[in-house]
Amino acid sequence: MTELPGLDLDALAAHLDTTRPELVTGPLSAELIPGGRSNLTYRLTDGTHRWVLRRPPLGHVLATAHDMSREHRVISALAGTAVPVPHTELLCTDPEVIGAPFYLMEQVAGTPMRSRADTAGLRPEQAATVAERLIDVLATLHEVDPDSVGLGDFGRPEGFMARQVARWRKQLDASRSRELPGIDELHTALGAAVPTAQRATIVHGDYRLDNTLVTTDPLGISAVLDWEMSTLGDPLSDLGLFVVYWQGLGGADDPITNGVSATPGFPSTDALVARYAARTGIEVGNLGWYVAFAYFKLAVVLEGIHYRFTQGGTVGAGFERIGTLVAPLVAAGNAALSEVKED
């Protein structure tokens, strides 16, 4: 078996032989799926069946992040709803098996659209439909009753955004290794103006186009992936982060959107926000605060990844550029919050 960073296939095969002997019918092979910046994701096959395995990153791990049990639980709970998710096969919480907890799920057909090259094959009318279905899936998620799917205790929605502001400051402090001008001011301003949530829902925590799989025949969203930050909370936290990923930092070479949002046919941010509001009935007049918070959160996430990179704890290419994105995100967050105050 081929050796992969973070995945011992011999140990995995032995574990599956013991716990799920009917699952695997041949020798296992695997490859690391590129593009991820947090949890490690691998394609796995026995020559007949195909799965995806998720495990935490190597090295430095922020407290409360990368919880495989939570990710496995929410995907399993949503399996019977209209939210498209993969079928889960196995959760292993024993870090001794492959060096960290992990879970196994089916491989779903579809493409994660991370660049203009990925969306180039979409006709404008197809791109419009994909974007509309993308925002509709987010609305569908926020319409799921947590109690009805066994997730009533999945989080503490009361005071959610205030805790988020405090939590991401702690995450920042856990990874702070350099000066980050403006980030403390952004955090203070956010904390002084936390809005009251209109309702409590399941939130994904990192909802964006390339955390879904897109199919063209039939045209649609086949799965929502990367649930590591999911919980119960304020649905506008998801929408605010979606807006940041959709509009990015501007420019054709924007590293946040990779230019994907400029794909012909993709609707504007305002159009997608209006569609979401019409579908859910949630007021979006104070969305700017959530957008500012999303810039702050994303800056902290990328600073954590940059810290892991400096400690040699990342796997794959492209991590050397992550640190340069933090300052522009902080600036965009302060700008977004200034616009809220002016309104």
Image (cartoon, rainbow, N blue to C red):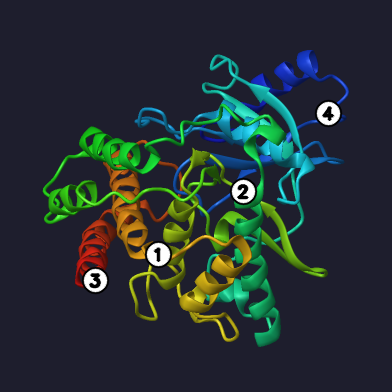
Task: Residue 339: give its label.
Answer: 3
Q: Amino acid at mark 4?
A: Val
Q: Amino acid at mark 2?
A: Leu
Q: Amino acid at mark 3?
A: Glu
Indicate which disc, 3 or 2, sits on the residue closer to the N terminus: 2
- Observer-side mark, 3 or 2, equals 3
Indicate which disc, 2 or 4, sits on the residue closer to the N terminus: 4
Tell me residue 298's x, y (percent): 35, 53
Local secondary structure at mark 3 = helix
Q: CA distance from mark 3 to mark 2?
A: 32 Å
Q: CA distance from mark 1 to mark 2?
A: 18 Å
Which residue is at 74% across, 66% downward?
220
Task: Residue 24: give its label.
Answer: 4
User: 10 Å neighbourhood of mark 4: few (<14), some, or many (≥20)?
Assistant: some
Which residue is at 31% across, 36% downward?
167
Tell me residue 95's x, y (percent): 54, 17
User: 10 Å neighbourhood of mark 1: few (<14), some, or many (≥20)?
Assistant: many
Q: CA distance from mark 3 to mark 4?
A: 55 Å
Q: Which residue is mark 1?
A: 244
Indicate which disc, 1 or 3, sits on the residue closer to the N terminus: 1
Task: Residue 34: give its label.
Answer: none
Position of the N terminus by quadrant: top right
